[in-house]
Image: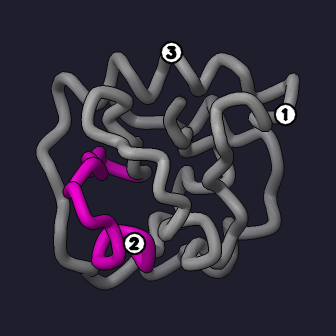
Amino acid sequence: MTFVVVDNCIRCKYMDCVEVCPVDCFREGPNMLVIDPDECIDCNLCVPECPVNAIFEEDDVPEDQKQFIQLNAKLAKKWPTITVKKEPPADADEWKDIPNKIQHLEE
């Protein structure tokens, strides 16, 4: 089992989650984070840290977000590891309540 980052993270990328991860499983893309399913130990520490509720246990990913299970696995192979929280995008607060942002994902 693993945790999955869904589209709530797109264009928000607050990064509160990365510093609590004991195995450094977060990967950073241009405008979102993903979790490497091969590294995640299912510890759940990141879930309460996410201010936009973008992290779900794989079995609990909402139906309309299921594509993010494979997307996290795919993007984790090409994006670099992130272990230190950085500043979120300047317009993150403007995007945090906008649903269905997959068209804004930058790979």
Q: Position of residue 35 (x, y in %)?
A: 39, 42
**Among numbered discs 3 and 2, the one appearing first in the sequence:** 2
Instruction: Give the magenta-colored segment's residue range.
Output: 15-31
What is the crowding at mark 2: few (fewer than 14 residues within 10 Å), some, or many (at least 20)? many
Residue to which mark 2 is pinned? 15
* Of the pair 52 and 12, the residue shown nearer to us: 52
Any part of residue 48 in sight: yes
Q: Distance between the Cα atoms at labels 3 and 1?
A: 14 Å
What is the crowding at mark 3: few (fewer than 14 residues within 10 Å), some, or many (at least 20)? few
Q: Mark 2 is on which residue type?
A: Met
Residue at image position (25%, 80%) is: 86
Is-magenta flag for residue 41?
no
Q: Position of residue 66 (x, y in %)?
A: 72, 21
From the viewer's perspective, tell me whether residue 86 is left or right of residue 96: left
Residue 62's disc number: 1
Residue at image position (19%, 36%) is: 79
* Of the pair 95 and 16, the residue shown nearer to us: 16
From the viewer's perspective, tell me whether residue 65 is left or right of residue 43: right
**Among numbered discs 3 and 1, the one appearing first in the sequence:** 1
* Of the pair 49 and 94, the residue shown nearer to us: 49
Residue to which mark 3 is pinned? 70
Q: Mark 3 is on which residue type?
A: Gln
Residue at image position (26%, 38%) is: 39
Q: Main secondary structure of the magenta part?
A: loop
Q: Position of residue 97 (x, y in %)?
A: 81, 67
Q: Distance between the Cα atoms at labels 3 and 2?
A: 21 Å
